[in-house]
């Protein structure tokens, strides 16, 4: 237990709940019963309410997690890159099993979904420091060093940015040089209405996946009479296969900060918050340094950027491992120190957001794009891309390709061109915008990537993730990984999502074992429709999108998986599972 916790908390507001829980988790390795009681007293809550917050987040534990807490990524990309070999090696070398701690209390092993390193798999976090491109011999070496007292932070990796492609002829929007203060310097000339007009002309739409026009959102907050107002950056990049925001924060933190400042100036806000996912603890110091640098230059704080009567500052709030917190209202609940459950949509965040005040929530790429648009002007920005879809888009490419990484493409590039750039290996099935997005076959490779929806040829929108799978990959295994992810990440508040995610996984297991029939496929579609129509947030609404699309686009493949005799006796024999114990423990 951490004694004297109350004395170390200057602000008793519940908005400090996650910070206090992180302090306890990191210092003690878990949250003690007495800590629950003290926090309940401090924040004037019941112990049950505090317990509910702790139990909601993956990275808060009620039992010790070991001196070295290891989180191994089990996303589908990790799976095809050697996850199982790394998992077995960790268990063998630490004498622990996953979801437990070894008998000495030295190593705790836990599985976690995508940690934002899909271009460098297999990967893991040890005490939240990153370790990438793991193999058996390297894992042995890491564990041996930890046993000898070497600290994880001294042997961890510095993940590569892997920026593989930017447009030619100086058309890069995001990765060209950015000089702090250049965009802010233009604000007094164009004024808040001028910012709105520039964003409108640029046709910038939210890059978190919803593609809502940025100018409309900012203007809606601007006209609100209530005060104070807030600017929130959603850096909870939890969609498996997505890591573009990680690279932006690591290389372009200045444009992110400046985009938030511009937003604050435009809507009349004085305070900004970056909600950074817990998996990115290793990025926090770099972001803090960039924020402090802006303060030291007079670009943050009182009279921000030399603009009289414009006071604006930014802080970082660490998330604690919850995919659903990427949904904007769940993120707000988390910021307020609560369980990250989506709100009912009585009000938009621009009306009543953080602390029930007008709030703008955009993701990292959107703020960076806004800063660049003000810096370069909308007139220059719209010269890039295609008519109706100007500018560039960042795409995180991973899977069966030789060059995984970040691709800054002009809107209008085809799938075929992107596959050639990343040197895809026999592509067969592509997952666009993560498990909640759209699946496409190689036959659709001539579709364009844009924000348009044409009558003759439907373009495809990509929120940021592009996972490639070749013909050697089992499509049902991919979909099973996705369904397991959604089942674990569902907040449980909606019965259709909570129950449907479980049922869908079981149906897919039947399919994988050769026991499913046509009726099971119809039931999968039926549950998908129920979840889409009745779930409160995007997780439930989109959890089965790819599955339903796959059953239509790859119908012949699914036909081969069915029990044609309908007798339930066609159970697949798993040789690997049958010999697992022998292979692990033979002398």
Image (spheres, grey):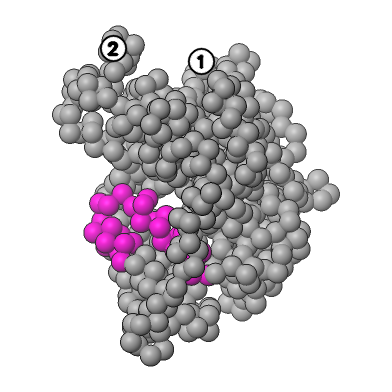
The tag on residue 390 is none
- Label 2 Cα neighbours within 10 Å, binned few <14 / some 14-19 / many ≥20: few
Name the residue beneath numbered marker 1: 302
Nearer to us of marks 2 and 1 is 2
Does residue 478 appear left or right of residue 22 in this picture? right
Q: CA distance from mark 2 to mark 1?
A: 37 Å
Measuring from the top left, give residue 420's x and y in whole percent. Answer: 76, 63
Which numbered disc covers residue 3?
2
- Which secondary structure lies at badge 2? loop
Q: Quadrant of residue 124?
A: top right
**SS of the residue at dot 1?**
loop
**Measuring 58% from the left and 77% from the top, which residue is drawn there?**
455
The answer to if 357 sits in the magenta stretch is no
Range of magenta residues: 475-504
Could you classify mark 1 by the number of other residues whose Cα lies within 10 Å: few (under 14), some (14-19), or many (20 or more)?
A: some
The residue sitting at 75% across, 60% down in the picture is 423
Asked which quadrant contains residue 53, the reply is top left
Q: Which residue is at the front of the view, 561 or 526?
A: 561
- Kindly identify the residue that appears in the image at 61 percent across and 47 percent down: 121
Q: Main secondary structure of the magenta part?
A: helix
In the rendered structure, the answer to whether residue 65 lies left or right of residue 159 reads left
Which quadrant, please, contains the N terminus? top left
| Of residues 73 and 306, the one drawn nearer to the viewer in this rendering | 73
- 492 within the magenta span: yes
């Amino acid at each position: 237990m951490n004694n004297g916790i109350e004395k170390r908390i200057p602000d008793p507001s519940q908005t400090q709940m996650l910070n206090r829980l992180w302090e306890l988790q990191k210092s003690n390795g878990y949250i003690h019963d007495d800590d629950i009681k003290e926090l309940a007293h401090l924040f004037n809550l019941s112990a049950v309410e505090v317990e509910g917050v702790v139990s909601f987040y993956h990275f808060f534990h009620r039992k010790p997690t070991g001196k070295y807490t290891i989180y191994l990524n089990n996303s589908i990309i990790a799976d095809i890159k050697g996850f199982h070999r790394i998992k077995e090696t960790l268990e063998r070398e630490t004498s622990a099993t996953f979801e437990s701690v070894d008998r000495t209390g030295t190593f705790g092993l836990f599985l976690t979904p995508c940690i934002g390193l899909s271009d460098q798999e297999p990967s893991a976090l040890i005490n939240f420091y990153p370790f990438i491109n793991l193999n058996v011999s390297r894992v042995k070496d890491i564990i041996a060093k930890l046993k000898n007292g070497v600290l994880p932070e001294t042997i961890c990796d510095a993940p590569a940015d892997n920026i593989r492609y930017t447009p030619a002829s100086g058309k890069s929007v995001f990765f060209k040089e950015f000089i702090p203060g250049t965009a802010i310097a233009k604000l007094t000339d164009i004024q808040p209405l001028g910012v709105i007009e520039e964003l409108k002309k640029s046709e910038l739409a939210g890059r978190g996946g919803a593609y809502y026009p940025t100018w409309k959102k900012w203007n809606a907050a601007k006209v609100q009479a209530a005060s104070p107002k807030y600017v929130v950056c959603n850096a909870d990049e939890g969609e498996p296969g997505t890591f573009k925001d990680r690279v932006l924060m690591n290389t372009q933190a200045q444009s992110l900060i400046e985009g938030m400042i511009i937003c604050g100036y435009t809507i009349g806000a004085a305070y900004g918050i970056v909600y950074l996912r817990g998996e990115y603890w290793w990025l926090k110091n770099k972001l803090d340094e960039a924020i402090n640098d802006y303060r030291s230059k007079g670009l943050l704080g009182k009279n921000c950027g030399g603009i009289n009567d414009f006071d604006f500052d930014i802080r970082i709030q660490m998330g604690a491992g919850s995919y659903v917190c990427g949904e904007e209202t769940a993120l707000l609940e988390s910021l307020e120190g609560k369980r990250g459950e989506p709100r009912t949509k009585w009000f938009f965040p621009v009306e009543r957001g953080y602390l029930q005040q007008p709030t703008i929530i955009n993701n990292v790429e959107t703020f960076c794009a806004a800063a660049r648009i003000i810096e370069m002007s909308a007139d220059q920005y719209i010269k890039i891309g295609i008519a109706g879809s100007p500018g560039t888009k960042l795409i995180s490419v991973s899977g069966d390709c030789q060059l995984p990484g970040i691709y800054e493409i002009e809107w209008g590039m085809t799938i075929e061109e992107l596959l050639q750039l990343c040197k895809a290996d026999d592509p067969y099935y592509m997952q666009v915008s993560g498990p909640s997005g759209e699946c496409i076959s190689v036959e659709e490779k001539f579709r364009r990537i844009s924000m348009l929806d044409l009558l003759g040829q439907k373009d495809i929108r990509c929120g940021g993730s592009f996972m490639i799978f070749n013909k050697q990959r089992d499509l049902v295994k991919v979909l099973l990984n996705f369904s397991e992810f959604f089942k674990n990440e569902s907040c449980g508040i909606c019965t259709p999502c909570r129950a449907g995610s479980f049922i869908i996984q079981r149906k897919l297991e039947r399919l994988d074992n050769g026991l499913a029939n046509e009726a099971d496929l119809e039931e999968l579609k039926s549950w998908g429709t129920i979840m889409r129509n009745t779930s409160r947030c995007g997780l439930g609404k989109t959890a089965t999108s790819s599955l339903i699309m796959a059953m239509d686009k790859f119908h012949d493949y699914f036909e081969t998986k069915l029990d044609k005799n309908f007798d339930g006796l066609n159970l697949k024999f798993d040789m690997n599972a049958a010999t697992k114990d022998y292979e692990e423990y033979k002398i």
